[in-house]
Amino acid sequence: TVDAILRCLAISDAAGYAKLCGEFESENSAHQDVANRLEVEHVPVLPDREYIHDPHAMVVFRLLDSRGIGAPDVKVLLTAGPNHDPNQLPENFLADRQLNRRSGNLSFFLNHATLTGCPAIPGRKPGEIARKALVPRPPYGLRIVPRDGEHYVEYWMAELEADVANLLPLIAPNETTIIDIRMNRIVREGVYRMTRQLSPRSFKDAELGGPL
């Protein structure tokens, strides 16, 4: 890792940058070849530990409000399969997930091999299988769901179904992809109303009007 950082710091022009990108891509391809993904840690007394190093991808969703008023409080769900179901996503597709509430940035660290599928990983001995082949469950989509119920000022659910666009071509292994999601702030009729009545009145159970 330190050697890779030093190689990056030594770059001084665009040609050197392009050359180093090509070198990193070749090294990643060799290192992440199916035959080389298995790492065995020899532990004294205890059984050896096996680790499989799949290629991963970072996806950062930047949640934006259409009027620039804070970050929308919504849930971002990935979907899979013809029914666009989050429960159909392949097992272990998500390695990590983090939300920055101040900026509204939601980061997913995805196992790219799990999403695209992967042949069986050979074990240490000839004919041995360390992990069975991974079967993908495309196409993949995106669903955005507001966390609260209906309000005078709210967001509506949005969905990018797989038949409209497949997310997978946008997500490359060993890379970070930034996707901006701009949510329209919906203001309903009744959020503000003039009246001749001077006494206070609760609008807690008032019926919500249509969008303005």
Image (spheres, rainbow, N blue to C red):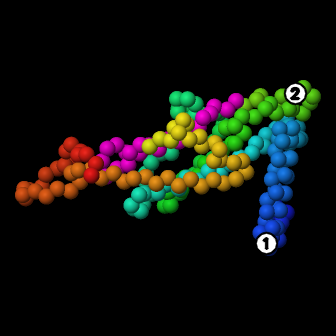
- Give the number of the mark in front: 2 or 1: 1
Q: Residue furthest top?
A: 127
The relative height of residue 76 versus residue 17 in the rendered view (above or below) is above
Amino acid, disc 1:
Asp
Residue at mark 1: 13
Give coordinates of residue 137: x percent, y percent: 63, 31
Q: Left or right of 154: which side holds 203?
A: left
Residue 79 visible: no
Q: Which residue is mark 2?
A: 128
- The image shows residue 53 at horizontal and vertical percentages of 78, 43
User: Element under label 2?
Assistant: loop
| Amino acid type, residue under disc 2 in the picture | Glu
Q: Which residues are magenta?
A: 135-157
Q: Specify whether 204 is left or right of 76.
A: left
Q: Residue at x 79, y 63 (%)?
A: 18
Mark closer to the chain start, 2 or 1: 1
Q: Residues within 10 Å of mark 2 (few under 14, many from 20)?
A: few
The numbered dot on residue 136 is none
